[in-house]
Amino acid sequence: MKSKIDFVLDFFSYGLKGGAKYYTWLGILALFILPWAYGSYQQLVAKGMIVAGYTDQISWAIYEGNFVFLVGVAAAAVTVVFPYYVYHYKPLKNVVLIGEMLAITAVIMVILFILFHMGRPDRLWHLIPIIGIFNWPNSMLTWDILVLNGYLGLNIICGFYSMYKRYTGQPLNEKFYMTFVYISIVWALSIHTVTAFLMNTMPTRPMWFHSLMPIKFISTAFAGGPALIIVALLTVRKNTKLEIPDEAINLLSQIVVWCLGIALFLILSEVVTELYPSTEHSFQLKYAMFGMFGLTKMAPWMWASYIMMIGSFILLLIPSVRKNYTILPIICVTLFIGIWIDKGLALVIPGMIPSPIGEFSEYTPTWIEIFIVAGNWAIGFMIFTILAKGAIGVMLGDVLHPSAVGKKVAHH
Amino acid sequence: MSTEEKKETEGTDISRRQFFKEAGAISAAVAAAAASSVIAPEEAEARTTFAEMFQKNYRLMTDEEKKEAIARLEQRHSEEYGKKVTVDGSPAIKDVLFGYALNIQKCIGCRRCVHACVKENNQSRHDPEIQWIRVIKMEKGNFTVDDMNKGYPANANESFGIQVGGNAYKNSGVALEGQHYYQPETVPEKDAFYFPIQCHQCEKPPCVKVCPVRTTYRDPDGIVVIDYNWCIGCRMCVAACPYWARRFNWGDPNLPAEEMNPNTHYLGNRPRMRGVVEKCTFCLQRTRKGRYTACLEVCPVGARKFGNLLDPESEVSKILDRKKVFRLKADMNTYPKFFYFID
Amino acid sequence: MKTRRIIKVTFGALVVGTMIFGSGRFQTQAQQEQPVQSAAATAPVTDCFESREGYTAVTRVENVTPDGNPNVKCSPTTNGVLWWGDPFDGTVPMGDMPAFGPDDKTRGDYETEEAVVKPREPMLMYFNMEPTQNCAFCHNGQTVPFPTDKNPRLLAAHQDIVENSMQLMHGRAAFWCLDCHNATNRNKLIDHKGNEVSFNQPQQLCGKCHGEVYIDWRMGIHGKRIGSWTKGGKKRWWVCTECHNPHTVQVNRFQAIKPELAPALPKGMKDAAHEQHHGGGPAPAAGHGEAAPAKH
């Protein structure tokens, strides 16, 4: 037990230790905390969600958008776990843990956004079976709660179990470990599928009500998530001693380009299917793309997202661009933002416009909402930085139990 | 507080005052005594809040627990609004299935139902303004010969197969793109008809299906109810309702004490709190006691009809029997018990 | 380890920070929003009307119900009644509703339930006359002689009720005032068979021609009832003239009234101009964008 506590303390101590650059980065992120705390206080304690730009017409907006998007980021860890464990693609050796740390972070962020989505976060215990009521299997939200928490657990087990074993210099219990790894691979798909089901099982919202939704979610997730991992890996490679081979990055950029291609194809299918017959059920997509009746707030975002995604796709198709590690992160960030708009803003919000009885209105986030969203992202980046730093320490052998010094155990 | 307790505290107060007087700190003692007498009801309030926080879902409470919960609410609201507030817990009446029929031909769009509902059901008056009924103004359509050739391409070869134009873009009828914020001098207007929408009390309610904590459920009389104390505010039901019937208390509801209707029901019009969903319950605080709904009673044209669907002699049953009836968004397969009809 | 201490210190700082925040010291004054003026808070509207403005007046009286409610609560915007504390305030039993033959299905539960109406006869006051005198005060055969036939002629008075007596806006010129009003007893109506009908039960007269609507009314499909929905419950029935003005019904089935206020615009919306552009088409200018401004 003591070695476990030591591990946790050593892990986080290492994660919080760094040079001036590292502290500057954490400091910048910390700057977002103060407005976040102010916003959180206003929304969660003082006044409630009325401080946000939400209305009865648009009752899901930016928090839910970020929630949906981040579930995708969490699921994307499978793009490194799968090739490494199933295809035994060795260059990903040092990447897997970073992917798992990203998954953990993303799920924590999801929980954070859900907290702000809730009208009564103080009553979340009503969901706990036995003392509360868990309307499973009827409610799709209960499925989502199950898969998301399960995924968080799986990644904590997979990630921290293997790190702990390295820390103490003990060999892995292969049977135990691999069982969880395989479960987590399937589970990763399930989290985003269920999140898609959460939305597309509502015929009330015609824009969401199509069976492409789960696969579109997964393909955009597997483009956006690895794009973020690429940026993280390039940063890690530049700033730490951890060895990240080019092959790892090349594989990920290939995954990005193909998943993005599939995603674009699915978007095209959706747009044609909706806009060709152009019934009242296509109003929501039409509003998102072109605006309707003079309400056009969403259209610039939508087109910016399309341009970002298509542009990145075309550029990433060129092998020399893909292998240029100066341009690649820029494309990855662009792509990441493009997908964030597509799945975060332009999917959730237009699904509410017009309302089920045909009322058009527009959504404008308040500053408090923006503070909260920015703060949640800053917290997310902070958690990821610290977790990744700790994981790198473990992989480099810097985070090591005194008893394990000198031991040499082969690990995955 | 029982009288005995009261005496006791008064007694200690006096002795304390005496003590301080002797000590020569008079002003401090007065302040302390005043503070102690103010705190007492707050403590009671805190205790109520604490008890409410851990109460069960209303549906699963025993009769005893229901009584306790209701007593707590009655005490709290009576204090809060400065009048005797009753919270009813009547269950559904046996062999009654409530149904509603609205004569869309008669409705003149005066919105009296909307405001009567607010008066009866203790909705938040502003910030957020909550109304359970929405009346939509629909166009009768205005087709003219002058528009026959408008919008068509001048040269048929340049049309790329696009074949709409002329009067095609005229709105007419139930298209669910009406006006929600119309405000003419008088109603009805010549070229419009009106379409009120509220909770349809579906037999297959999508809102109930998606609720993760079953705070909203269907009672035997067909009313979809909400236990406001159990709602976690996830708004799945708001997103799933095809009739946009559900409203959310985005902030603390603003209900002036003098406008508060003290005859309430636990599952109906009792004051709500921040962060929970609410909606039309067919005024179950009234209807379960035999009274018509508030919206029906104020309709100046008698377009609204309500009654027991299981009684063939009831007004709604007669309408279903004799009139042309339709349900809104029948394709959703929700089986509403809110019917629209024409003569 | 040094960093361990840093963790502790940071955590401590966070806790303290949260406590300061929690104490509400940073709350801004901006949240003290001015409450919107509630009209009911000042003086409740007392001169109200039920359905037909000018013909269904009702005055709010405080504390008439057992639980201390007024008889009605009215809209400060339109003076329309928005809530009945006592649905049976000022009503009288409706009286007889003859069956259409032995197996009449149109009366519903009328046989077993209590039906009341608001008497219309007190509304017959004219020129501020005494209620007991009503129309017959002048139409007594001497002050105003009884007419000898039912032929339309120009009236010397009552232009406020019937603007042009040669063109009665009811029945499309097929009949005239005295087909409904009793020539020799102006406080009563009269049907085509010469039976006197009370103003309190105009349906017995109207139903003679408007048979289909009358049947719907008897069954509760047409018209309005308030009170108890239950089988056998007490109901107040609205009679024909409480909603329809028989003198102008040909042009105005229901007299236009002022609507209640529109809902507040959703947060972030400045106006509802986009609603004027509806019609499904791409360019509002091409279609009916200008066709339906929110004006009568």
Image (spheres, helix red, strand yellow):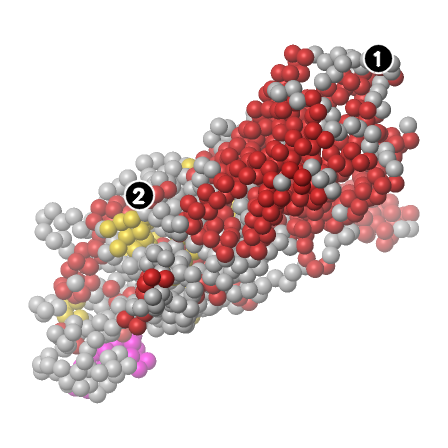
Depicted C256 relative to depicted A223: above or below: below
Is B195 left, or right, of C98 in this rendering? right
Q: Quick one: B144 or B132, which is closer to the camera?
A: B144
Residue sitting farthest toward the front:
A320
Position of A135 relative to B263 (above/below): above
Could you confirm whether marks 2 and 1 are on the same chain? no
Q: Is residue B251 magenta?
A: no
Q: Is residue C128 magenta?
A: yes
Q: Position of residue A197 (x, y in %)?
A: 49, 35
Q: Amino acid at mark 2?
A: Asn
Q: Which residues are magenta?
A: C125-144
How many other residues sit within 10 Å of disc 1, few (<14), some (14-19) or many (≥20)? few
Q: Is residue A46 visible?
A: no
Q: Main secondary structure of the magenta part?
A: loop
Q: Position of residue B38 (x, y in %)?
A: 72, 49
Q: Chain of mark 1?
A: A
The residue labelled by disc 1 is A407
The disc label shown at residue B308, or none: 2
The image quadrant where one finds the N terminus of chain A is: top right
Q: Position of residue B199 (x, y in %)?
A: 41, 47
How many numbered dots are placed on residues in this image? 2
Q: Nearer the viewer, residue C166 or A291?
A: A291
Question: Which residue is at a point 45% across and 42% down the rendered structure image?
Answer: A269
- Rendering quarter of residue C153: bottom left
In terms of secondary structure, where does tag 2 sit?
A: strand
Residue B92 shown left or right of residue C150 in the figure: right
Q: Amino acid at mark 1?
A: Lys
Q: Quadrant of the C terminus of chain A?
A: top right
Distance from disc 2 to disc 1, alpha carbons, whole Å, reads 80 Å
10 Å neighbourhood of mark 2: few (<14), some, or many (≥20)? many
Q: Chain of mark 2?
A: B
| Dot 1: element | loop
